[in-house]
Amino acid sequence: MNQHTVDAVARVISNRRTTKRLCDPGARHEHTLPLNPDERAVLKRMLEVAGQAPFHKPADADTHRQESLASPVPWRFHVLEPEACVALLDWLEQQAATDTPPWVRAWASKVPALLAAAGVLVMATWLPNPSDNPDPEFSHANIEHVAAAGAAVQNLMLMAEASDWDSYWSSGGVLREPDTFERLGISTREQLLGAILLTPRTRPADKIMPGGLFDKRGTMSDWTRRVAL
Ligand SMILES: Cc1cc2nc3c(=O)[nH]c(=O)nc-3n(C[C@H](O)[C@H](O)[C@H](O)COP(=O)(O)O)c2cc1C
């Protein structure tokens, strides 16, 4: 590997920053444009390359590999392009109109503005083993599934950075709700690892915000020690 490649990879990793892009959800029907063919090609490449993450154990076959998403990798990416984000917003607004407190709160959260600005929402899930273990979320196997899925998400965001797209890994808020999973056709046996927003920088945004901890990580010596024996 030559120095040029090392520098290019280091630049992509270091330049990636949480970038929250927000637009007025009320203007979504007038302003939202579908992905153009170039953007769709970039997205396809991002998703293909992201999936080259390492994984240690196959996802449980009976629980997670029954239908068209049959891969043994312990993550799934459910991808919503702009039209699907608008349809999801329409549904969230209808839910809020029922005056049920969680949905009213959801409509008042940042999620609608994020969806209105989104190029793409990737609902990234990890695939827990069936709960024969009393504390399945913390079994070693499940920790490794989460780790592998996290590596795939980071790959996705690095590909976004290299493609001049902004990225934001959100815990998801209302997007974690079982009703939202049902609306999106995601099995509730999957767990949301992140609602990943990926947007070409050429797209409009009313407001752009950084991550809350972006300047708090310190330097390498704050998280690394050399073991001398
Ligand atoms: C698992 C995970 C979940 C996150 N969820 C949120 C979130 O819900 N809201 C938020 O503002 N940032 C969220 N972030 C982004 C962090 O705030 C961000 O990574 C951090 O501030 C460091 O900034 P940087 O990504 O620009 O380096 C999340 C990041 C990770 C890894």
Image: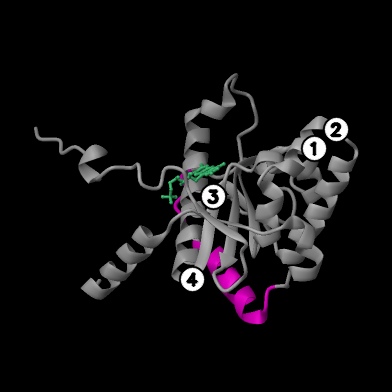
The residue under label 3 is which amino acid type?
Trp
Q: Mark yes or no: residue 164 visible.
A: yes
| Vertical side of 3 occupied by 133: above or below | above
The residue tagged 2 is 100
- Precedes in sequence: disc 1 or disc 4: 1
C-alpha gap between disc 2 and disc 4:
39 Å
Q: Quadrant of residue 128?
A: top right
At horizontal 80% and vertical 37% (from top left) the residue drawn is 104
Question: Ligand 1 within 8 A of label 3's CB?
Answer: yes
The residue lying furthest to the left in this view is 229
Residue 164's tag is: 4
The residue tagged 3 is 169
Image quarter in which the C terminus is found: top left
Within 10 Å of disc 2 (Cα), the crowding (few <14, some 14-19, many 20+) is few
| Magenta-colored stretch includes residue 41 | yes
In percent of width and height, residue 214 lies at 40, 47
| Magenta-colored stretch includes residue 115 | no
Q: Which residues are magenta?
A: 35-56
C-alpha gap between disc 2 and disc 3:
27 Å
| Vertical side of 23 occupied by 126: above or below | above
- Precedes in sequence: disc 1 or disc 3: 1
Front: mark 2 or 4: 2
At horizontal 79% and vertical 54% (from top left) the residue drawn is 88
In percent of width and height, residue 155 lies at 47, 58
Q: Quadrant of residue 64?
A: top right
In screen coordinates, is 33 left or right of 99?
Answer: left
Within 10 Å of disc 4 (Cα), the crowding (few <14, some 14-19, many 20+) is some
The residue tagged 1 is 104
Question: Ligand 1 within 8 A of label 2's CB?
Answer: no
**Who is closer to the viewer here, 45 or 208?**
208
